[in-house]
Image (cartoon, rainbow, N blue to C red):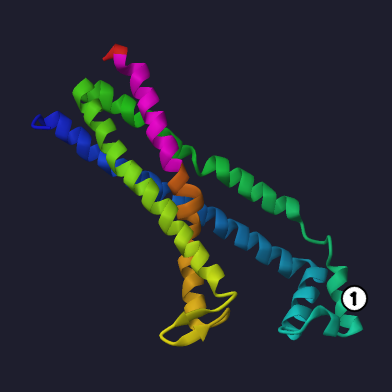
Amino acid sequence: ISKPNVMAGLLLGGMLPFLFSSLAMGAVGRAAMDMIQEVRRQFNSIPELKAALDVMRKNDGKEFADWSAADQKTFEAADGKAEYSKCVEISTAASIRQMILPGLLAVLSPVAVGFLGGAEMLGGLLAGVTVTGVLMAIFQSNAGGAWDNAKKMFEEGVEIGGNTYFKGSDPHKAAVVGDTVGDPFKDTSGPSLNILLKLMSVVALVIAPLL
C-alpha cells in the first residue's frame, strides 16, 4: 500500500459500494414515486375507486360488517376496477431501466482501472471494494431488517419509558419513516452488494491476462 497506484485503487474501491448503494436506493425511490403517481391517477380518474375511497374514509375505524348496505355495495363495486397491469408495467420497467447505471458501474470500473492504472491498481480496487462492500452488506441487511421489524412491533404494542404505544402513535409514525429507509437497505442495496463484489472480481479475472 506504499505505492501510490495501489493506494489510489484502495480508495477508489472503498468508495464504490457507497456509490452503488446510493444509485440503487435512488432507483427504488424514483420507481416508488412513479408508482404513487399512477395510483393517485387511478383513484382520481376511475369513478368506482374514487367512491370506494370516500366510503373507506367515512367508515374509518369500523368493521366492514358495521357499514351500511349502500356503503358495502359501493365498496364491492370497486373490486376489479383497478388497472393493476399499469403498476406491474411501472415496476418492471423501473427494475430494468433504473439499474442500468449500477450494473455498468460494476462491469466497467475494473476494466477502466485495470487498463488505465495497471494490475496493481486493479488489485487495490478489488481489496478496497471487498473490505467496505462486505461491511456495508452486513450493516444494510441487519439495519434494514431492524427498521422493518420495528414498525411491525407496534401491532402488539411497544413499551417506551413506561408507556405502551400502538399503531397510529407518534413512535409508530417515526418507525414507518424509518422503514422507508430500512426496506431499500434490506431488500435492494444490501443483497446487491454481494453481486457487486462477485461481478467485479470475475471481470478482473477475465481481463487479467491482458494487463
- Residue at 38% x, 23% y is 203
Q: Nearer the viewer, residue 142 or 44?
A: 142
- Residue at 41% x, 41% y is 193
Q: Is residue 73 left or right of residue 162?
A: right
Where residue 181 appears, as percent x and y from the top left, is 45, 61
Q: Quadrant of residue 146?
A: bottom left
Task: Verify whether residue 131 appears in magenta.
Answer: no
Kindly state the secondary structure of the residue where label 1 is placed.
Answer: helix
Where residue 6 appears, as percent x and y from the top left, is 16, 30
Above or below 87: residue 173:
below
Where residue 128 appears, as percent x and y from the top left, is 25, 37
The quarter of the rendered structure image containing the N terminus is: top left
Q: Is residue 116 left or right of residue 24?
A: left
Amino acid type at circle 1 is: Lys
Q: Which residues are magenta?
A: 192-208
Q: Is residue 118 visible?
A: no
Q: Is residue 71 left or right of residue 53?
A: right
Above or below 162: residue 87:
above
- Residue at 90% x, 82% y is 70
Q: Quadrant of residue 120?
A: top left
Q: Quadrant of residue 197?
A: top left
Count of numbered labels shown in the rendering: 1
